[in-house]
Amino acid sequence: MSDGPAAVTPVPPPPEPEGGGSVSGLQAFYDRAGGLLVPVAAAFLAFLIGGIVVLVTEKSLTAPFEAYKAIFEGTGVTWFIPGVGDTAEEARDLQQTLLITTPLILTALAVAFAFRCGMFNIGGQGQYWVGLLTGIWFGTHFDGAPMALHITLTVVAALLAGALWGGIAGALKATTGAHEVISTIMLNWIAIWVGKWLLEAPDGYLQGTDPSLPRSNDVLDSAKLSEVWNWGGLQPLHAGIFIALFAVLVYHLLLNRTTLGYEVRAVGFNPDAAAYGGISVKKNYFLALAISGGFAGLAGAIDLLGWKYRLTSTEFDANLLGFVGIAVALLGRNKAVGILFAAFLFGALDVGTSPRQLDPEVFNPELATNLATMIQALIIAFVGAEFLILYLWRARKRVGWAGPRRVEPELKP
């Protein structure tokens, strides 16, 4: 007779299927791929559907290929191909692509930094305008100041103004729990309407010398950024692109090499766990949105000092760089390198689909801008679909998609 129940060898759990059979495995696969899988697939599908729309619109099988070929050539990217893009026209197109890419980098950083702290900054547009409006005042004053000092003073003032505007939303979230999406949207409209009043009111503080025109004076020559590439005909590429590239480096180092960046990412992963570990969640909410606003305010200053030089009230309705920055950040997966490539893609798409680039016999130029907007929207939708895929992958076990369950042998004493 035995003295007790026989020892039972525990049955090991079944191994995960190859390729990642769980949400964590699927996410690990994305991480190992460097975050390229979803953005590349999203861009491919967006351009594929855009091509179908061109096919239906133009009723020609070759229309999508001809339209995309014209768009690609209109971006100026062919300038990099030896023996193909060596003309002044391609150089000018590439200038315009880089010119638009520059502020998109910064407005995307404004979204991405807040996102890494678990917040969705919709206020990049308002922060951009606050930075630009501040830049107008500093850029039109201090006549006679040395160029280096005047530019530095104007850029820093715009950056701080954007940081203050973003910090308002951060302070509201930290102190009252107000959701940043609501507060930043409201701050967007405040910035827009105050800006219009400053330019249009009879006693508008930023109105130019001609009261009949709702626009500001030009910034002084001592506040203008230097040209770095000019083929003539259109706006030259200015030194602001180097400021934007430096901001990308600062973004990467700040998040990955500093205590502040560690705390921001910790709060973004799990604010409760971060608070348990001694990290001030409220402080990081404020700092994350303030730093985000600083990036967007810097974008406004660079646009003003690099090529705009003035502001008219009509631009408030036409300029959407802050909102496009949201799409750039999503496509770039909030990574520094990803944002660089995503900003260039959106800048190229904007320039390549401009009416001056497309031959009416190839594609109706009036529909070109709509095509660009549609492709951008589709990219956002497909990038966002990743979260839906992960959710469905997790939910498959609840509805029996995971296959037959393993039946454990009955244990007897």
Image (cartoon, rainbow, N blue to C red):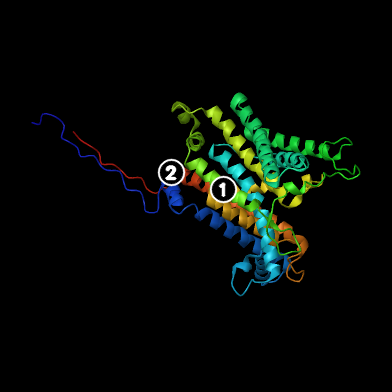
- Locate residue 260, reporting x and y percent: 50, 35
Q: Nearer the viewer, residue 151 or 97?
A: 151
Q: Which mark is residue 248?
A: 1
- Locate residue 185, reporting x and y percent: 69, 37
Q: Nearer the viewer, residue 266 or 28?
A: 266
- Locate residue 347, reporting x and y percent: 66, 56
Quadrant housing residue 84: bottom right
Q: Quadrant of the N terminus?
A: top left
User: Is residue 401 at least partly visible in the picture?
Assistant: no
Q: Does residue 167 sit above or below 71 in this rendering?
A: above
How far, Cα to Cα, is label 2 from label 1?
41 Å
Nearer the N terminus, badge 2 or badge 1?
1
Which residue is located at x 91 percent, y 44 percent?
Answer: 212
Q: Find disc 2 in the rendering and name its residue.
A: 397
Q: Does residue 396 sit above or below 366 in this rendering?
A: above
Instruction: Select label 2 or label 1 by which is in front.
Output: 1
* Secondary structure of the residue carrying numbered label 1: helix
User: Is residue 268 at least partly visible in the picture?
Assistant: yes
Which residue is located at x 63 percent, y 68 percent?
Answer: 79
Q: Nearer the viewer, residue 342 or 130?
A: 130
In this image, 217 relative to 7: left or right? right
Q: Residue furthest left?
A: 1
